[in-house]
Image (tube, grey):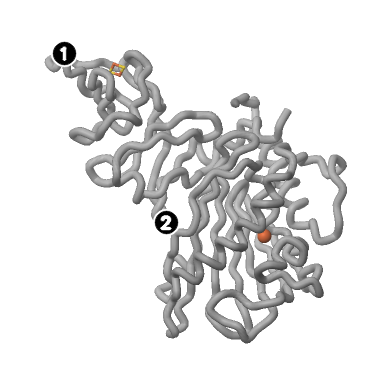
Amino acid sequence: MNVMEHAVFRRFWYPVMPMSELKQGPRRFELLGQALALFLDDDGVPAALEDRCCHRTARLSLGEVCDNAIACPYHGWRYNREGQCVLVPQMPDRDPGPKRRVKAFSCREKYGYAWVALEQPLFDIPDFPEAVDDSFVLIHEFYEEWRVSGLRVIENELDMAHPSYVHLGTFGSPEHLVAEDAKIEEFPGGFHYTGRLGVKQAHHAQDRNNERFLDCSWYAPFICRLRINYADGPAHVIINCQVPLAHNRSQVVQFCFQEDDGTGIDEAAILAFDRKVTLEDKHVLESTDADVPLDPRDERHMVSDKPGLVMRRMIQALIDDHETRAVTFQ
Ligand code: FES
Ligand code: FE
């Protein structure tokens, strides 16, 4: 059984769609094999319904929003954000009744995305301290599909031994093979991870330093906050979220908080640098196996793999604590 077939993955919030997209009209998204019709209600709050009309199964996401409801493109039945059909245009005087309804999912907006949980979420959407700090600016970076398991990408974010091989074209230093002073502190549903990593070249927007002070947090199962500080210069905080489409496909959702230290923010330079780094990761990650064994005996390891191993252990514990069944999807 592939790790992503565990039903517990339905119990987390995922940033499935940029709000800027939803402002253009309803959109379809397949989360863990569940087709969703996403739309904005009259208050601008995102809603998520099963993308299948209960009349003749047409995709609601092809419809449009009318009077605080999504109207099916086929015969115009309208559904509110709870999934209840509120109007059958061909029988306007009749109450559509409780049987005319589709499944609705928890949906809310945060950080400029519509977040969805397919079942009662185990943890809230993380609060990132930089989001309420006026010296930081939020920049949306990437929203794209990769052919990889999201767990491999998140583990990569926590792996400080790969830059000196994968990122030689950007910041990786062949002389600094592992992070120094690496520490992990667990909390319910995640952990903090700190350390220092020598780099060949400092981050964009500065060129005076060659050591990163890393302050990372992992939030189960698919969110990583990677705060990169240097001895001088502004902090760069990457939020990498992997939204599982299927066991071997992941929607990469990355945004960042960039500190403005008074010298201004060159958004284009930040995006260009992070794009290069991201493509270096993608090249290798898409070559990895889709399944990620949680049992440490099923792959070989080294000392610097500890954050990934703690991540795998904590996911296994969540499965053991909360799961009663598995699901299968394409
Ligand atoms: Fe949706 Fe007929 S299929 S209204
Ligand atoms: Fe990387």
- At label 1, the amino acid type is Met
Q: CA distance from mark 1 to mark 2?
A: 41 Å
Classify 266 as above or below 308: below
Residue count near mark 1 (Cα–Cα under 10 Å), binned few <14, some 14–19, many ≥20: few
For the C terminus, give its image quadrant: top right
- Which label's residue is closer to the chain start, 1 or 2? 1
Q: Residue furthest left?
A: 93
> What secondary structure is found at the residue carrying circle 2?
loop
Classify 301 as above or below 268: above
Q: Residue at x 27, y 46 (%)?
A: 44
Q: Residue at x 75, y 72 (%)?
A: 173
Q: Residue at x 65, y 26 (%)?
A: 326
Q: Viewed as shown, does residue 234 lie left or right of 132?
A: right
Q: Nearer the viewer, residue 316 or 299?
A: 299
Expressed as whole percent of the image width and height from the top left, the position of residue 142 reads 50, 54
Expressed as whole percent of the image width and height from the top left, the position of residue 152 reads 69, 47
**Taking the image as drawn, is residue 36 in sight?**
yes
Q: Which numbered disc covers residue 15?
A: none
Classify 197 as above or below 187: below
- Residue indicated by mark 1: 91
Classify 277 as above or below 153: below
Q: Viewed as shown, does residue 117 lie left or right of 224?
A: left
- Residue indicated by mark 2: 111
Q: Residue at x 34, y 13 (%)?
A: 56
Expressed as whole percent of the image width and height from the top left, the position of residue 184 reads 72, 63
Expressed as whole percent of the image width and height from the top left, the position of residue 322 reads 64, 35
- At label 2, the amino acid type is Tyr
Q: Residue furthest front?
A: 169
Count of all numbered marks drawn on residues in the image: 2
Q: Quadrant of residue 85?
A: top left
Q: Quadrant of residue 201?
A: bottom right
**Taking the image as drawn, is residue 129 in sight?**
no
